[in-house]
Image (cartoon, rainbow, N blue to C red):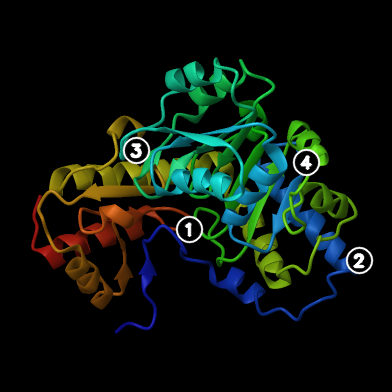
Amino acid sequence: MPQHLKLFIPGPTEVRSDVLAEMARPLISHRGEEMAQLQRHVSQQAARIMYTSNPVLLSSSSATGLMEGGIRNGVERRALSLVCGAFSQRWHKIALDCGVEADPLTVAMGQANSPETLDRALASGKYDAVTVAHNETSTGVANPIREIAAVMRRYPDVLFMVDTVSSLGGLPLKVDELGIDLCLASVQKALALPPGFSLCSVSPKMMDRSRRATRKGFYFDFTRMLDKAEKGQPLTTPSISHMFAMRRQLDHILEEGMERRWGRHREMGAAVRAWAKDRFGLFADEAHASDTLTCVANTRGIRVADLISGLRREGMLISNGYGDLKEKAFRIAHLGELTMEDVSTLLSTIDRVLGLTA
């Protein structure tokens, strides 16, 4: 077996060697001035990538923790969860597990959430918060975030909370322009860092809710986190090694430029979708298919596990379908630091492993 498998899975993804090397730096005091400079730099660079003037909070956790934080800090009456797959459904389940009243607004797997349906639900006046996945990692659907944001602007008292776990750094996203109150992401996908760290931007409206919130716990108390961040400090002991790596990688991303980075992902997405349509089929509605990962419908009835094994022997790794989609689909991620050359090599290798021709 090859020593390293080239990762075409939805996370973790390939990480630059110099970024990985940053994880081996000698540690520093997480309460010293060097730490304050590191935290401020990382937060400022992240804000540039997110196109926001809002504070950015850093968390040594997966983004699931920040999803729970959004519920505990932000929902006072009732949440509406836009559900189009496993991870958008997770946010609804988190709300229920936190004892928060919440309703799902669900579409069929492979479909995007509808702005018109959202508008009708919010017109009821029942909700004070909405959760939505920008990019549903389980199905390869990119929700129409600009159209959803346009609806949200009609309801200024409703919090707009967005999961950008598999979109931030890969799909066009401008937090302030969209009016997002909580924009959260983990770092192991399009940001191309090792897993175990996450970040979020918080609007003044989000923070007003947090200050009023009770029973929000300690670890994901946004008020406490922001109070510390304003002093250049983490609330609790952070993964300092991740922050070293994040400093280097965010600099790389900004050096590439967000428009160029989005364009690279767009090109890779188009290539994989064209291949998928020719060889199999797309699981996601093509009008809302993601540029960071493609969910391929297993129309040929192949044994996906065998394809994955065959690719492992070639030094590459893709993902089976997630949850109920296992063996019914497979997922090819084209995000982070991957290139068109990487994608072309993968697709030709799949053709060879399966004995397929155009």
User: What's the amino acid at mark 4?
Assistant: Ala
Q: Position of residue 139 (x, y in %)?
A: 34, 46
Residue, disc 3: 289
Q: Nearer the viewer, residue 92 or 88?
A: 92
Q: Earlier in the sequence, mark 4 or mark 1?
A: 4
What numbered label is drawn on residue 337? 1
Q: Is residue 162 left or right of residue 89?
A: right
What numbered label is drawn on residue 33? 2
Q: Are marks 3 and 4 in contact (CB under 8 Å)?
A: no
Q: Residues within 10 Å of mark 3 (few under 14, many from 20)?
A: many
Q: Position of residue 226 (x, y in %)?
A: 82, 49
- Secondary element under disc 4, as helix, strand or loop, is loop
Residue in view at x 66 percent, y 52 percent: 199
Residue in view at x 24 percent, y 49 percent: 296
Q: Earlier in the sequence, mark 1 or mark 3?
A: 3
Q: Position of residue 80 (x, y in %)?
A: 54, 32
Q: Residues within 10 Å of mark 1 (few under 14, many from 20)?
A: many
Q: CA distance from mark 3 to mark 4?
A: 37 Å
Residue, disc 4: 213
User: What's the amino acid at mark 3?
Assistant: Ala
Q: Earlier in the sequence, mark 3 or mark 2?
A: 2
